[in-house]
Amino acid sequence: MIRTLLLALLCLGLAGPARAGLNVFATLPEWGALARVIGGDAVRVFVATHARQDPHHIEARPSLIARARQADLVVANGAELEIGWLPAVLSAAGNRAIQPGLPGYFEAATQVALLEVPVRVDRADGDVHPAGNPHIGLDPRLLLTVGAALQARMAALDPAQAAVYDANWSAFRTRWQAAIDRWQARAAPLRGQAIVVHHTAYPYFTHWLGLTRAGTLEPKPGVAPGSAHLAALRDALAGQRVLAIVRPPYAPEGPGQWLAQQSNIPLLRLPISVEQSADETGLNAWFDGMIDHLLALRR
């Protein structure tokens, strides 16, 4: 009986790693969702933030450090979006495999051409990202580019599951392209419509759908809007046809509310990341919801 038990434990030990797959630490919900789509049951994915948090300002909590210590792969946004907390998490984790420059560290932003690359970097200009605007997840077409690179990285790290990752990615790519085509057709009436944004978080979304930006509540990125700036913005918007004032969930509601009342422009809460489950269902609901809300305001 003892011999049988030892044999069973040995078999479990041998089988365990093959089933384990990758342990993924994703900084944003959209990248966690993409890792889950590619990995399926072969991966375990932890997402460090949620859509109601400002991804620039996250505390390097012990729980995040513990998760990073166990990770085989970090999927970061990059373009310095997480510069205020991710380096501290990775350093404290003491996990050499997931440090920048090694295969266990993946940055989504390095896979695409960034918008709003500054010609100069000066702290007087606010929280400017030297590499360009980091909020790439708001253009669903870029998820195809990032996903292809992520699938290749996951397959390289876990060759035993490479065929699974490839099959999952191929199937998702077809579904996602069909969804993009559907969204673009539905959102066609939005082309040329103007919006005011709280923070410069939406250029990839507006570029994709052909929206224009009529103004920004923040006078400079990351700088809270003051009364003089808001009054000047109200005056500048007078007589313009503006669809909405758009703010991310974590932004204070007060400045947008004031401008909405003063200018008779609707205030819309528009998430810059997946709000529901960080999976394919959540990804679809994210883009469906944003387009639905904007179409409901069209006039």
Image: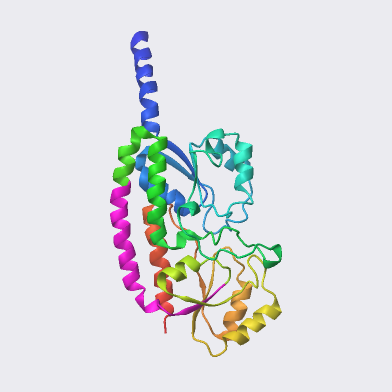
Residue 61 visible in the snapshot: no
Q: Note whether residue 234 is visible.
A: yes
Tell me what residue is drawn at x 34 percent, y 36 percent: 161
Residue 290 among those drawn in magenta: no
Image location (x, y in percent) of residue 171 = 28, 50
Q: How is the image coloured?
A: rainbow
Which quadrant is home to the N terminus?
top left
Residue sticking out furthest to the bottom: 239
Above-or-below relation of 30 to 154: below
- Point 55% across, 55% down: residue: 79
**Residue 144 position in % (x across, y down):** 37, 55
Give the answer, above or below, for where 113 lies relative to 91.
below
Majority secondary structure of magenta residues? helix
Q: Which of 129 and 253 is in front in this view?
A: 129
Q: In this view, does 246 lie above or below 19?
A: below
Tell me the magenta residue range. 169-197
Classify residue 92 by image quadrant.
top right
Percent from the top left, x then y, of residue 255?
63, 74
Name the residue rendered at 50%, 37% in the picture.
71
